[in-house]
Amino acid sequence: MIKNLIIFGTRPEAIKMAPLVRAFQNENNQFETRVCVTAQHREMLDQVLDFFEIKPDYDLDLMKPNQNLYTLTSDILLGLKPILEEFQPDYVYVHGDTTTSMASSIAAFYSGAKVCHVEAGLRTYNKLSPFPEEMNRQVTSRIADFHFAPTEQAKQNLLNENVLESTILVTGNTVIDALLESTSKVENLDNPEIEKLKTIIDPDKKILLVTGHRRENHGQGFISICEALKEIAQLNPAVQIIYPVHLNPNVKKPVYELLSKIDNIHLIEPLAYPAFVWLMNKSYLIITDSGGVQEEAPSLGKPVLVMRDTTERPEAVEAGTVILVGSNKEKIILECNNLLNNKEQYNKMSALHNPYGEGKACEKILDFVRNNHKYN
């Protein structure tokens, strides 16, 4: 029996790891798979666990007031030690670029388990953008034994860093596996958040969905973004902007100060995953600084403007499914108005192929681990 421990702590990780948990648990004659959550993000994580019907075997429950990177990293390392000693997994799976991933990979390495990095190889090569994610994923790559890269570009990044090609598998992104399952599920879901959204949204108007939270946009960045949204709303009164506002005061304060009195901008509480998937699918255009949305939206045919100066997902830029606008007020307004008013440009962008796969990532990972284990 192959023993797997899958570790995650944030909402994006949970979304992307949920289909992998299910894939392994469905093969319980060959794999004993346990789930550990650090609860780096507590409430938002629990919403995803409920939606995907995942019950963690271990819960470190680490989220606390005034949490910082120092305490979080040390708490994860210390919290995982007894779990790793008790279960003694063959493989530990971590995802992407969070502090949970970086600290868990170190703990797994200390325990002697093989480390499997899902969504491996993403890079900006700027250690401060995004911070601390860029260094989290680079550290994880140095430790990982197996690298599940979402794209050929991610694989090439790893090869350039002298990672053995035999340890890399291009899978596509597991977020597409999760999304394709979820879009059909939410259409018939009895969900109070979705029902509330239906009372806000005018189905005859184009929906512009906005999300933002990145540290690099705190301060003047969010002020510029809000000024851009205000002008877009005023120039396009027939468009409704729906903005689930992140709870971080560095985001919430400028957003509410600058946008709360504009008629066609609706500022709402952060949405759980099912309602957010439903809203993405109803949207015309998305403006975001989220990495996951850059991957998901093209599968729904939604153009994306990315409020970042750099992205570790250059495939989307090259494919034309996203446009980088940073926090540049003029650029946000220009590109948004172009997509709102130029139907030909919009149709061209929305019809492009998603570079992050067709929803088969988990199947590829499972087969790789099964076949690789025969030779170890």
Image (cartoon, grey):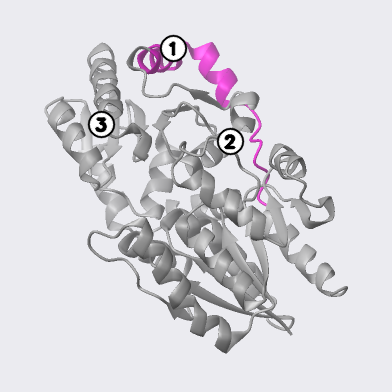
The answer to the question of whether label 3 and label 1 lie on touching residues, with beta carbons closer than 8 A, is no
Give, as a single range, the part of the protein colored magenta: 331-359
In what element is the residue under mark 3? loop
Mark 3 vs mark 1, foreground winner is 3
Residue tagged 3 = 219
Amino acid on which the number 2 mark rests in the picture: Tyr
Is residue 12 rendered magenta in the image? no
Report x, y in % for residue 123: 60, 39
Query: Viewer-nearest of labels 1 and 2?
Result: 2
Residue at 76% across, 67% down = 369
Q: Give me the C-alpha separation between circle 2 and circle 3.
A: 23 Å
* Left or right, residue 231 beside residue 50: left
Amino acid carrying label 3: it is: Gly
Q: Residue at x 16, y 34 (%)?
A: 256
Mark 2–mark 3 contact, CB under 8 Å? no
Under circle 2, the secondary element is: loop
Q: The C terminus lies in which quarter of the figure?
A: bottom right
Identify the image quadrant of residue 39: bottom left
Query: Can the viewer see residue 265 in this picture?
Result: yes
**Residue position for label 1:** 338
Residue 259, position in %: x, y?
18, 28
Q: Which residue is mark 2?
A: 125
- At x 17% / y 37%, what residue is drawn? 253
* Marks 3/1: CA–CA distance: 27 Å
Badge 2 density bin: few <14, some 14–19, many ≥20, Cα 10 Å: some
Query: Is tag 3's residue or tag 1's residue first in the polypeptide sequence?
Result: 3
Q: Name the kind of residue labelled 1 in the image.
A: Asn
- Out of 102 and 2, give the one closest to the viewer: 102
Taking the spot 65% from the left edge, 26% from the top edge, the residue there is: 319
Q: Earlier in the sequence, mark 1 or mark 2?
A: 2
